[in-house]
Amino acid sequence: MTGGMMLLDLLVTLLLIAGAGFMLVGSYGLLKLDQPMKRLHAPTKASTLGVGSLLMASMVDTFATGDGSLHELLVLAFLFVTAPITGNFIAKVHLHRQRDDNDLPPPPAEEGWATHSEK
Amino acid sequence: MSQRLARKLLPHPMLSTMLVVVWCLLINHLSLGTVVFGAILGLLIPISTAAYWPDRPKITRPWRLVSYMGIVIWDIVVANVQVAMIVLFKRNADMAPNWVVIPLELRTPEAITMLAGTITLTPGTVSADLSADGAALLVHALDAPDPDAVRDEIKTRYERRLKEIFE
């Protein structure tokens, strides 16, 4: 095994460990945090840097062993596009549930927040 | 006349380009056949969906998108580490979760969508709602003793740049 391959293997390993670590922290956060809106922060973390590192590891590995693969970029792109929408919908459900006693700050204009609007 | 025809055939040039790139990435192999079929998809899909997306988003400085994405990716990495520290080592009672109201200067739906997505992707903040008149964004911050500082940072760091790209 040449030194370059060793280095690449090391990089792949580091990326895998970092990715797994962030996923673990994300899941732990989901368990530890105590309010619904606070909980929402944990999975957004896991899905960005956690999955990102794992995909980077996969990409480095395919390029190191011969035929490279760029599928991972697509996975990442679709994830980055859909993750905020999922988060937004969960937040909206939360806003609907606390419609009657909400602690939200009012928006600058008079019409209120869209989720609570009657229109 | 020719401009109207070009607009009819290519209602969303950016979407067409992206479809070709996505198709080549899906096939995971670059050859003439892949590019040609991708180009066919890139022509047909925007035409058949033009009725649902009539306006073309105005992107005045597309090259700034690249530096914007660089900044966002860097912020995701930095903020991820910060939030991981908060989750691991800060007690629930010590956190200061807060709602933050961000008055928007952006007006186009595409720009506001990108800002809301950026806010959610950078950990520590989740965009939750838009005001009914579309002039303010409701954001939840995990640990923000000073909500005004979060608002100012989002406005100067992301919104200002998006405004340069889209307006």
Image (cartoon, rainbow, N blue to C red):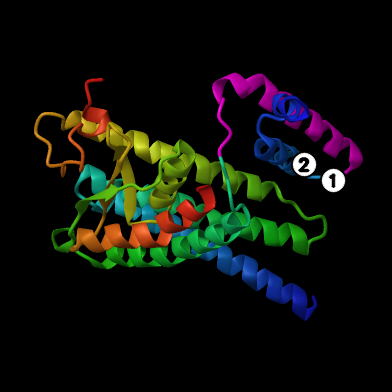
Q: Residue B105: which disc?
A: none
Q: Residue A14 or B75: which is nearer the viewer?
A: B75
Dot 1 crowding, Cα within 10 Å, few <14, some 14–19, many 20+ = few
A4 vs A102, left or right, is right
Q: Is the magenta region chiefly helix, strand or loop? A: helix
In the image, taking residue B130 as reference, residue A118 lies left or right, namely left
Q: Amino acid at mark 2?
A: Cys
Indicate left or right for A20 with A72 as reference. left
Residue count near mark 2 (Cα–Cα under 10 Å), binned few <14, some 14–19, many ≥20:
many
Q: Residue B89 at x, y = what percent?
A: 26, 68
The percent position of residue B148, horizontal first and vertical second, equals 22, 60
Query: Residue B56: within the magenta?
Result: yes
Badge 2: chain ID: B
x then y, percent, for residue A82:
49, 39
How far is mark 2 from mark 1, CA to CA? 6 Å
- In this rendered view, identify the residue nearer to me: B147 or B163: B163
Residue for point 33% across, 36% down: B134
Instruction: Please give the label number shown on residue B24.
Output: 2
Residue drawn at the location 41% of the way across and 37% of the way down: A86
Question: Please, which residue is most extreme toward the left here?
Answer: A101
Q: Amino acid at mark 1?
A: Leu
Mark 1 secondary-structure assignment: loop
For the record, the magenta segment spans B30-57
Secondary-structure class at tag 2: helix
Q: Which residue is mark 1?
A: B30
Asked whether the beta carbons under mark 2 and mark 1 sit within 8 Å of each other, the answer is: yes
